[in-house]
């Protein structure tokens, strides 16, 4: 496990210490921090740890109380795309899996709010660390997390997401940002993070991969490739998980391994990739039988998430090589394109690919991204890029046609929609969000 994961285990350590009765954390209201306690070095540290925790919950999912949990973008976007399928019955999740959600969908609402909480928590941490003139890499990491939240909104939600702010303790309703504007905002925060890494190689590489990811989203392919050239092949920046509490457990493990609430998809809706039957080590699976919840769906489980402590990769050298590969492909350099793809495959112990020829290169590029980045909240953004940047038709990209049960058909949405709760914002109108547009 690399330093990045060990470093972020400090949050888990704090939670374990609290569970064990550590007197330093033994307070009457452990979930409430008084404003006066958020000053100085200790306050900035608390805000930073809180931002990291909020980001992990929004990205990976997890319990937020004894009575509520967040599915997380890994699960939500995986269901919406072709990575996961839903082998149970609650209609809100069936509608996400079918790409036919409504603005009152509770799971999308929860994810929308969780991602905004992560964004505001990261911005607060940046402000606090800036105020105390923190000289560590925490300032860069907090700024990077803020950038990632904007990138994730742009990749997964419709164009027209409003971004409100808290000013002097009051919420100031925000205006909708287009998909392009969300990516530009993400890049601004990642650019700022790049100047503050304080010699921390892991945080610097997190920022480099994040910048490359957003530059791909913006269609700046050459810049994206240049952004990640120095990232080592074996780099991994992981969101850590543990059995310390329900909050810190890997949510995919709970949904997929502890219950029949989630399964791996395989050739879903005609266009979905063969994640199971390909027998690729990057999507290693285990057959669990027919779902005990809907009594009809075969369920395959993702072996890399077979523990509640399984980490989720946020950024990696594999992603860096895939970014470089796409930059080379767009630069009409198929030799370098294939070299970068094969360097990424080495990390999974796979042999080299051959060039399939000009007509099949884009398909192979996105297949390698799908397998190399499986279960890390990348696939939905990639499917939308295939429409937006490569001119593919939505029904040729997303799972289409008959749903796998209940005689239902799939919808036509290609993005998560802004939930109804945002209609309280006077600056937002439901017409600002069209989930059928990439």
Image (tube, rainbow, N blue to C red):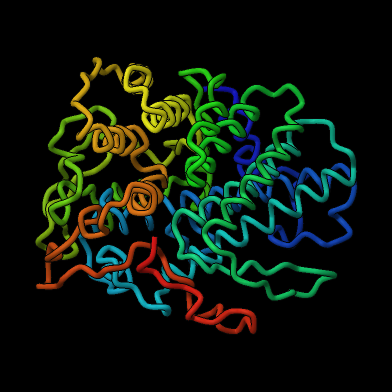
Q: Residue at x 48, y 36 (%)?
A: 221
Where is 164 relative to 334, above or below? Answer: below
Q: Is residue 318 visible?
A: no
Relative to 119, is 99 on the left or the right? left
Q: Residue at x 55, y 83 (%)?
A: 423
- Along the line of sight, the residue nearer the viewer: 53 or 349: 349
| Spot occupied by residue 258 in the image (x, y as percentages of width and height) | 30, 50
Relative to 131, is 50 on the left or the right? left
Where is 194 relative to 185, above or below? Answer: above
Q: Is residue 403 visible?
A: yes
Relative to 247, is 380 on the left or the right? left
The answer to which image quadrant residue 302 occupies is: top left
Q: Residue at x 29, y 66 (%)?
A: 99
Which residue is the extreme one toward the front? 332
| Spot occupied by residue 252 in the image (x, y as percentages of width and height) | 37, 48
| Spot occupied by residue 234 in the image (x, y as percentages of width and height) | 46, 19
Quadrant containing the C terminus is bottom left
| Spot occupied by residue 169 in the image (x, y as percentages of width and height) | 81, 71
Where is 361 relative to 415, above or below? Answer: above
- Along the line of sight, the residue nearer the viewer: 349 or 217: 217
Q: Residue at x 72, y 45 (%)?
A: 48
């Amino acid at each position: 496990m690399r330093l990045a994961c060990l470093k972020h285990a400090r949050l888990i350590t704090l939670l374990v210490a609290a569970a064990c009765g550590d007197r330093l954390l033994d307070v009457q209201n452990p979930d409430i921090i008084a404003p006066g306690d958020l000053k100085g070095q200790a306050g900035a540290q608390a805000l930073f740890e809180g931002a990291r925790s909020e980001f992990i919950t929004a990205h990976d999912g997890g319990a937020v109380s004894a009575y509520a949990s967040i599915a997380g973008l890994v699960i939500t976007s995986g269901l919406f795309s072709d990575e996961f399928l839903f082998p149970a019955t609650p209609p809100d999740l069936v509608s996400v899996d079918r790409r036919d959600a409504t603005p009152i969908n509770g799971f999308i609402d929860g994810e929308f709010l969780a991602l905004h909480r992560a964004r505001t928590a990261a911005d607060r941490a940046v402000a606090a660390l800036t105020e105390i003139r923190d000289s560590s890499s925490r300032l860069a990491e907090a700024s990077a997390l803020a950038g990632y939240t904007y990138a994730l909104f742009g990749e997964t939600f419709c164009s027209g997401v409003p971004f409100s702010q808290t000013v002097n303790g009051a919420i100031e309703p925000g205006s909708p940002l287009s998909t392009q504007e969300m990516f530009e905002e993400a890049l601004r925060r990642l650019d700022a993070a790049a100047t503050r890494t304080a010699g921390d190689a892991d945080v610097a590489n997190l920022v480099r991969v994040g910048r490359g990811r957003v530059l791909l989203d913006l269609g700046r392919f050459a810049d994206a490739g240049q952004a990640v050239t120095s990232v080592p092949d074996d780099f991994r920046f992981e969101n850590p998980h543990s059995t310390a509490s329900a909050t810190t457990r890997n949510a995919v493990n709970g949904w997929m391994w502890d219950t029949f609430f989630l399964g791996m998809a395989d050739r879903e809706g005609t266009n979905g990739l063969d994640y199971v039957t390909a027998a690729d080590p990057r999507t290693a699976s285990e057959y669990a039988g027919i779902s005990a919840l809907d009594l009809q769906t075969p369920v395959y489980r993702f072996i890399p998430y077979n523990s509640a402590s399984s980490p989720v990769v946020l950024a990696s050298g594999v992603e860096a090589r895939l970014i470089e590969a796409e930059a080379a492909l767009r630069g009409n350099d198929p030799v370098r394109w294939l070299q970068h793809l094969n360097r990424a495959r080495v990390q999974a112990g796979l042999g080299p690919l051959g060039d399939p020829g000009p007509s099949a290169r884009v398909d192979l590029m996105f297949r390698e991204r799908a397998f190399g980045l499986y279960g890390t909240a990348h696939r939905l953004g990639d499917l939308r890029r295939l429409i937006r940047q490569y001119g593919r038709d939505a029904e040729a990209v997303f799972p289409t046609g008959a749903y796998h049960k209940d005689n239902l058909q799939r919808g036509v949405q290609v993005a998560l929609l802004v939930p109804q709760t945002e209609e309280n914002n006077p600056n937002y109108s439901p017409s600002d969000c069209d989930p059928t547009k990439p």
